[in-house]
Amino acid sequence: MRFFVGVTDYNWYKVHASRLQVDEVNFWRPSPDAGFKALKTGEPFLFKLHSPRNFIVGGGFFTKFLQLPVSLAWEAFGNGNGANTFLEVRQKIAKYRRQQVSPEEDPRIGCIILTEPFFFPESDWIPCPDNFSLNIVSGKGYDTDEPMGASLWADVSGRLVKTQASDPGPATVAAIHAARFGAPVLVMPRLGQGAFRLLITDAYEHRCAMTGERTRPALEAAHIKPYSRGGPHELSNGILLRSDLHK
Protein backbone atom coordinates (compact mmCIF):
# COMPACT_ATOMS: atom_id res chain seq x y z
CA MET A 1 0.00 0.00 0.00
CA ARG A 2 1.28 3.44 -0.90
CA PHE A 3 1.05 6.43 1.40
CA PHE A 4 2.48 9.94 1.50
CA VAL A 5 4.04 12.00 4.28
CA GLY A 6 3.35 15.72 3.78
CA VAL A 7 5.04 18.57 5.66
CA THR A 8 2.89 21.08 7.52
CA ASP A 9 3.22 23.63 10.32
CA TYR A 10 2.40 23.19 13.98
CA ASN A 11 -0.37 25.79 13.97
CA TRP A 12 -2.22 23.93 11.17
CA TYR A 13 -2.07 20.76 13.28
CA LYS A 14 -3.05 22.59 16.48
CA VAL A 15 -6.22 24.09 14.94
CA HIS A 16 -7.47 20.63 13.97
CA ALA A 17 -6.27 18.70 17.02
CA SER A 18 -8.11 21.13 19.30
CA ARG A 19 -11.49 20.40 17.68
CA LEU A 20 -13.76 17.67 19.05
CA GLN A 21 -14.70 16.29 15.63
CA VAL A 22 -13.06 16.79 12.25
CA ASP A 23 -14.67 15.19 9.18
CA GLU A 24 -12.42 16.66 6.49
CA VAL A 25 -9.43 18.94 6.04
CA ASN A 26 -7.86 20.92 3.25
CA PHE A 27 -4.10 20.33 3.18
CA TRP A 28 -3.48 23.33 0.95
CA ARG A 29 -0.40 24.47 -0.88
CA PRO A 30 0.19 28.17 -1.52
CA SER A 31 1.39 27.91 -5.11
CA PRO A 32 -1.16 28.53 -7.89
CA ASP A 33 0.78 25.99 -9.98
CA ALA A 34 0.79 23.24 -7.35
CA GLY A 35 -0.07 19.71 -8.41
CA PHE A 36 -0.37 16.38 -6.62
CA LYS A 37 -0.30 12.95 -8.27
CA ALA A 38 1.35 10.85 -5.56
CA LEU A 39 -1.80 9.06 -4.34
CA LYS A 40 -5.00 7.46 -5.55
CA THR A 41 -8.35 8.01 -3.88
CA GLY A 42 -8.45 6.23 -0.52
CA GLU A 43 -4.67 6.06 0.04
CA PRO A 44 -3.33 7.51 3.31
CA PHE A 45 -1.73 10.94 3.63
CA LEU A 46 0.24 11.58 6.84
CA PHE A 47 1.12 14.90 8.51
CA LYS A 48 4.74 15.62 9.45
CA LEU A 49 5.55 18.86 11.29
CA HIS A 50 8.20 21.31 10.19
CA SER A 51 11.61 20.99 11.80
CA PRO A 52 12.53 21.07 14.66
CA ARG A 53 9.33 19.13 15.46
CA ASN A 54 10.26 16.17 13.29
CA PHE A 55 7.29 13.99 14.12
CA ILE A 56 4.30 12.48 12.32
CA VAL A 57 1.23 13.75 14.12
CA GLY A 58 -1.77 12.36 12.22
CA GLY A 59 -3.17 11.89 8.75
CA GLY A 60 -6.21 11.39 6.56
CA PHE A 61 -7.28 9.70 3.34
CA PHE A 62 -6.77 11.26 -0.05
CA THR A 63 -9.96 12.19 -1.87
CA LYS A 64 -9.14 14.73 -4.58
CA PHE A 65 -6.67 17.40 -5.62
CA LEU A 66 -8.13 20.65 -6.97
CA GLN A 67 -6.79 24.10 -7.74
CA LEU A 68 -9.26 26.57 -6.21
CA PRO A 69 -9.58 30.25 -5.40
CA VAL A 70 -9.01 30.65 -1.69
CA SER A 71 -12.51 32.08 -1.22
CA LEU A 72 -14.06 28.83 -2.46
CA ALA A 73 -11.72 26.74 -0.31
CA TRP A 74 -12.83 28.78 2.70
CA GLU A 75 -16.53 28.50 1.79
CA ALA A 76 -16.19 24.72 1.52
CA PHE A 77 -14.00 23.96 4.55
CA GLY A 78 -13.87 27.00 6.85
CA ASN A 79 -11.45 26.22 9.68
CA GLY A 80 -10.85 22.86 7.99
CA ASN A 81 -8.18 24.91 6.17
CA GLY A 82 -6.20 24.91 9.42
CA ALA A 83 -6.99 28.51 10.31
CA ASN A 84 -9.60 30.23 12.43
CA THR A 85 -10.43 33.06 10.01
CA PHE A 86 -10.40 33.73 6.28
CA LEU A 87 -7.96 36.59 6.86
CA GLU A 88 -5.56 34.20 8.59
CA VAL A 89 -5.53 31.90 5.55
CA ARG A 90 -4.76 34.84 3.25
CA GLN A 91 -1.94 35.93 5.55
CA LYS A 92 -0.45 32.44 5.51
CA ILE A 93 -0.58 32.33 1.70
CA ALA A 94 1.27 35.67 1.59
CA LYS A 95 3.84 34.37 4.08
CA TYR A 96 4.65 31.23 2.10
CA ARG A 97 4.61 33.03 -1.24
CA ARG A 98 6.77 35.79 0.25
CA GLN A 99 4.66 38.42 -1.45
CA GLN A 100 1.70 40.53 -0.43
CA VAL A 101 -1.83 39.41 -1.35
CA SER A 102 -3.84 42.50 -2.30
CA PRO A 103 -7.32 43.01 -0.76
CA GLU A 104 -8.97 42.56 -4.19
CA GLU A 105 -7.04 39.38 -5.02
CA ASP A 106 -8.60 35.91 -4.71
CA PRO A 107 -5.45 33.78 -5.10
CA ARG A 108 -5.67 30.22 -6.35
CA ILE A 109 -4.12 27.52 -4.19
CA GLY A 110 -3.54 23.79 -4.53
CA CYS A 111 -6.01 21.86 -2.37
CA ILE A 112 -5.31 18.29 -1.24
CA ILE A 113 -8.71 17.26 0.08
CA LEU A 114 -8.50 14.68 2.86
CA THR A 115 -11.38 12.96 4.62
CA GLU A 116 -11.63 10.81 7.75
CA PRO A 117 -8.68 12.72 9.27
CA PHE A 118 -7.05 11.67 12.54
CA PHE A 119 -4.73 13.50 14.91
CA PHE A 120 -2.45 11.98 17.52
CA PRO A 121 -1.91 13.48 20.99
CA GLU A 122 1.67 14.60 21.52
CA SER A 123 2.42 11.50 23.62
CA ASP A 124 1.70 9.38 20.50
CA TRP A 125 3.65 11.40 17.95
CA ILE A 126 5.81 9.18 15.72
CA PRO A 127 9.46 10.12 15.12
CA CYS A 128 10.18 10.94 11.50
CA PRO A 129 11.77 8.07 9.51
CA ASP A 130 15.55 8.18 9.15
CA ASN A 131 15.31 8.51 5.36
CA PHE A 132 13.07 11.60 5.50
CA SER A 133 15.55 14.38 4.79
CA LEU A 134 15.07 17.63 6.69
CA ASN A 135 15.52 19.41 3.35
CA ILE A 136 12.25 17.98 2.00
CA VAL A 137 9.79 20.84 1.58
CA SER A 138 6.55 19.19 0.39
CA GLY A 139 6.72 15.51 1.34
CA LYS A 140 7.79 12.00 0.47
CA GLY A 141 6.03 8.82 -0.65
CA TYR A 142 6.35 5.40 1.01
CA ASP A 143 5.19 1.86 0.29
CA THR A 144 4.35 -0.86 2.79
CA ASP A 145 6.16 -3.35 0.52
CA GLU A 146 9.41 -1.68 1.63
CA PRO A 147 10.87 -2.13 5.16
CA MET A 148 10.81 1.56 6.08
CA GLY A 149 7.27 2.00 4.82
CA ALA A 150 6.04 -1.17 6.53
CA SER A 151 7.57 -0.13 9.85
CA LEU A 152 6.13 3.37 9.70
CA TRP A 153 2.65 2.18 8.73
CA ALA A 154 2.68 -0.36 11.59
CA ASP A 155 3.27 2.54 14.00
CA VAL A 156 0.48 4.59 12.40
CA SER A 157 -2.09 1.78 12.31
CA GLY A 158 -1.40 0.91 15.95
CA ARG A 159 -2.26 4.46 16.95
CA LEU A 160 -5.26 4.49 14.61
CA VAL A 161 -6.82 1.68 16.61
CA LYS A 162 -6.46 3.81 19.76
CA THR A 163 -7.71 7.09 18.29
CA GLN A 164 -10.47 5.95 15.95
CA ALA A 165 -13.92 7.43 16.52
CA SER A 166 -16.91 5.43 17.73
CA ASP A 167 -18.13 5.37 14.12
CA PRO A 168 -14.95 5.03 12.01
CA GLY A 169 -15.23 5.68 8.29
CA PRO A 170 -14.78 2.97 5.65
CA ALA A 171 -11.25 4.05 4.66
CA THR A 172 -10.12 4.00 8.30
CA VAL A 173 -11.58 0.53 8.83
CA ALA A 174 -9.93 -0.74 5.61
CA ALA A 175 -6.55 0.71 6.62
CA ILE A 176 -6.65 -0.95 10.04
CA HIS A 177 -7.79 -4.23 8.47
CA ALA A 178 -4.93 -4.07 5.95
CA ALA A 179 -2.39 -3.57 8.72
CA ARG A 180 -3.71 -6.57 10.65
CA PHE A 181 -4.31 -8.99 7.82
CA GLY A 182 -1.99 -7.82 5.04
CA ALA A 183 -4.71 -7.37 2.43
CA PRO A 184 -4.75 -3.70 1.42
CA VAL A 185 -7.94 -2.60 -0.31
CA LEU A 186 -8.61 0.96 -1.50
CA VAL A 187 -11.93 2.27 -0.23
CA MET A 188 -13.56 5.60 -1.06
CA PRO A 189 -13.35 7.67 2.14
CA ARG A 190 -16.52 9.00 3.71
CA LEU A 191 -16.99 12.50 2.36
CA GLY A 192 -17.70 15.54 4.47
CA GLN A 193 -20.00 18.32 3.32
CA GLY A 194 -17.22 20.49 1.89
CA ALA A 195 -15.62 17.65 -0.07
CA PHE A 196 -19.05 16.63 -1.39
CA ARG A 197 -19.69 20.15 -2.62
CA LEU A 198 -16.36 20.49 -4.39
CA LEU A 199 -16.41 17.01 -5.97
CA ILE A 200 -19.91 17.59 -7.37
CA THR A 201 -18.91 21.04 -8.66
CA ASP A 202 -15.83 19.58 -10.33
CA ALA A 203 -17.69 16.59 -11.79
CA TYR A 204 -20.24 18.88 -13.46
CA GLU A 205 -17.46 21.22 -14.67
CA HIS A 206 -18.88 24.14 -12.69
CA ARG A 207 -22.14 24.11 -14.69
CA CYS A 208 -25.73 23.65 -13.57
CA ALA A 209 -26.87 20.24 -14.86
CA MET A 210 -30.16 21.71 -16.16
CA THR A 211 -29.35 25.24 -17.36
CA GLY A 212 -25.59 25.34 -17.89
CA GLU A 213 -25.31 28.32 -15.52
CA ARG A 214 -21.68 28.91 -14.44
CA THR A 215 -21.96 31.79 -11.95
CA ARG A 216 -20.40 30.25 -8.84
CA PRO A 217 -22.53 31.88 -6.10
CA ALA A 218 -25.66 30.72 -7.93
CA LEU A 219 -24.70 27.04 -7.91
CA GLU A 220 -25.38 24.45 -5.20
CA ALA A 221 -24.34 20.83 -4.84
CA ALA A 222 -27.65 19.02 -4.35
CA HIS A 223 -28.34 15.54 -3.04
CA ILE A 224 -30.45 13.35 -5.33
CA LYS A 225 -31.71 11.41 -2.30
CA PRO A 226 -31.96 14.10 0.42
CA TYR A 227 -29.32 13.96 3.13
CA SER A 228 -32.07 14.36 5.75
CA ARG A 229 -33.57 11.07 4.51
CA GLY A 230 -30.35 9.10 4.59
CA GLY A 231 -28.89 10.19 1.27
CA PRO A 232 -25.09 9.98 1.54
CA HIS A 233 -22.41 12.55 0.74
CA GLU A 234 -21.34 10.56 -2.35
CA LEU A 235 -20.55 11.57 -5.91
CA SER A 236 -23.23 9.18 -7.23
CA ASN A 237 -25.84 10.92 -5.05
CA GLY A 238 -25.05 14.45 -6.18
CA ILE A 239 -26.06 16.88 -8.91
CA LEU A 240 -25.03 20.51 -9.45
CA LEU A 241 -28.01 22.85 -9.73
CA ARG A 242 -28.74 26.55 -9.90
CA SER A 243 -29.85 27.50 -6.39
CA ASP A 244 -33.41 28.49 -7.36
CA LEU A 245 -33.97 25.12 -9.06
CA HIS A 246 -32.47 23.32 -6.09
CA LYS A 247 -34.87 25.08 -3.73
Image (cartoon, rainbow, N blue to C red):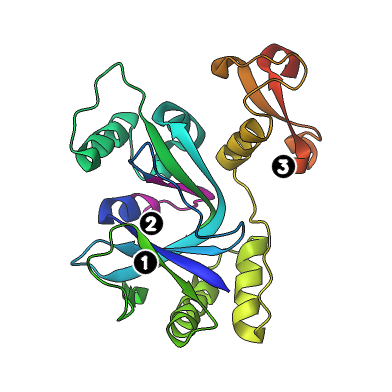
Snapshot quadrant of residue 62: bottom right
**Relative to 5, does residue 127 appear above or below in the rendering?**
below
Q: What SS does tag 2 mark?
A: helix
Frontmost of labels 1 and 3 is: 3
Residue 45: which numbered mark, if any? none
N-terminal label among 3 and 2: 2
N-terminal label among 1 and 3: 1
N-terminal label among 1 and 2: 2
Frontmost of labels 3 and 2 is: 3
Q: Position of residue 23 (x, y in %)?
A: 54, 50
Magenta segment: does it hold 141?
no
**What residue is pinned by disc 1?**
57
Tell whether 244 sits left or right of 151. Answer: right
Q: Position of residue 150 (x, y in %)?
A: 49, 83
Q: Residues within 10 Å of mark 2 (few under 14, many from 20)?
A: some
**What residue is pinned by disc 3?**
235
Residue 17: which numbered mark, if any? 2
CB under 8 Å between discs 1 and 2: yes
> The magenta stretch spans which residues?
15-28
Instruction: State the residue in front, 122 or 216.
Output: 216
Snapshot quadrant of residue 34: top left
At horizontal 60% and vertical 15% (from top left) the residue drawn is 218
Residue 241 appears in the rendering: yes
Tell whether 10 sits left or right of 152. Answer: left
At horizontal 23% and vertical 39% (from top left) the residue drawn is 97
At horizontal 42% and vertical 27% (from top left) the residue drawn is 71
